Image (cartoon, rainbow, N blue to C red):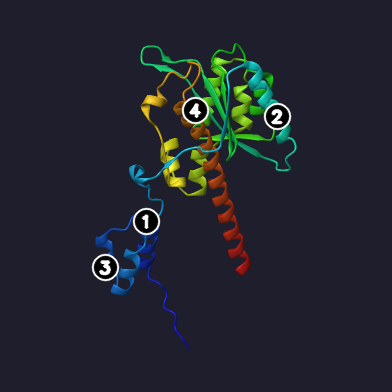
Amino acid sequence: MTTVRPISLKCQDENEKIAQGRVTRRSIQNLPDSVKEKLLNVEPLHKDPDISTLPEIKFAGKTYYVTDFEGCALICDQVIERIEKFTNSIVPIGFDLEWPFSFQTGPGKTALAQICVSENTCHLFHIYNLKKLPASLIQLLSHSRVKLVGVNIKNDVWKLSRDFPEFPASQVVEKNCIDCGPLTNQVYNRSGRWSLERLTAYILQKKISKDDKVRKSKWHILPLTESQKIYAATDAYVSLLLYLTIQKKAEQLALEETNKKTQI
């Protein structure tokens, strides 16, 4: 009969520190050589990558850019029609806004609304010159089966409401927004606040462009340049991709947990 020796509390503590990425060489020195080698080869969990070394991510799908009320309304009607044909209860949409900024006057009126409806399709609505938002755009963003996904997304929703008072920000914030930052903290057991740049690096292992020449450009001037279009579409695309990746991880962890319970 083989006798199984219980692991000492000291070894349990060291293993816990390793799992949390908090172990130091001094604490490892007190362990047996056989354990030492194994633990030193364990990568700390939740390590943030060096963003400067990562490959850049850019949206390479179809971008539809409209600058008038009718064009925006037509596209939104078409998207709503497709959403209502889906069997899924939730339809995630990558959402983001752009606006001009001045150090003298602060943020200007919302100039561009970006919605990424799939990994291959992104719509750019230039709304700066509109006196009010098309009813179909409001209906889309507040649809009962739509979830607007992104990083710090509620701030964008409130911004849109300040510039277009007819937009029901309170309702959309409460029922339609999923912030990928808190979702990451929940699924990956992290804490803290995330920027789109940091979260893209951590979840997707990619670098998103934050070129100030484009980010702080004149978003209200028509037409947008190709660089502006790519930048704007990429932000919405990455927002959707982050949500889909985090959701897939959550489903994977849930499945693993179910399998563990089944094996007991």
Q: Which element type, helix, strand or loop, lies under badge 2?
A: helix
Q: Name the residue under label 2.
A: 78
Camera-nearest label, 3 or 1: 1
Q: Distance between the residues labelled 2 and 1?
A: 47 Å
Mark identifier at residue 44: 1
Q: Residue at x 48, y 44 (%)?
A: 185
Task: Give the amino acid type for the residue marked by disc 2 in the picture.
Answer: Gln
Judge from the rendering whether residue 14 lies leftward or rightward of residue 138; answer left or right: left
Q: How crowded is mark 4: few (under 14 residues within 10 Å), some or many (20 or more)?
A: many
Instruction: Give the mark, 4 or 1, whose residue is nearer the N terminus.
Output: 1
Q: How crowded is mark 1: few (under 14 residues within 10 Å), some or many (20 or more)?
A: some
Q: Which residue is drawn at 55% across and 12% down?
A: 129
Q: Which element type, helix, strand or loop, lies under badge 4?
A: helix
Q: Distance between the residues labelled 2 and 3?
A: 66 Å
Q: Which element type, helix, strand or loop, lies under badge 1?
A: loop
Q: Residues within 10 Å of mark 3 (few under 14, many from 20)?
A: few
Q: How far apart are marks 3 and 1 (CA)?
A: 19 Å
Q: Name the residue under label 4.
A: 229
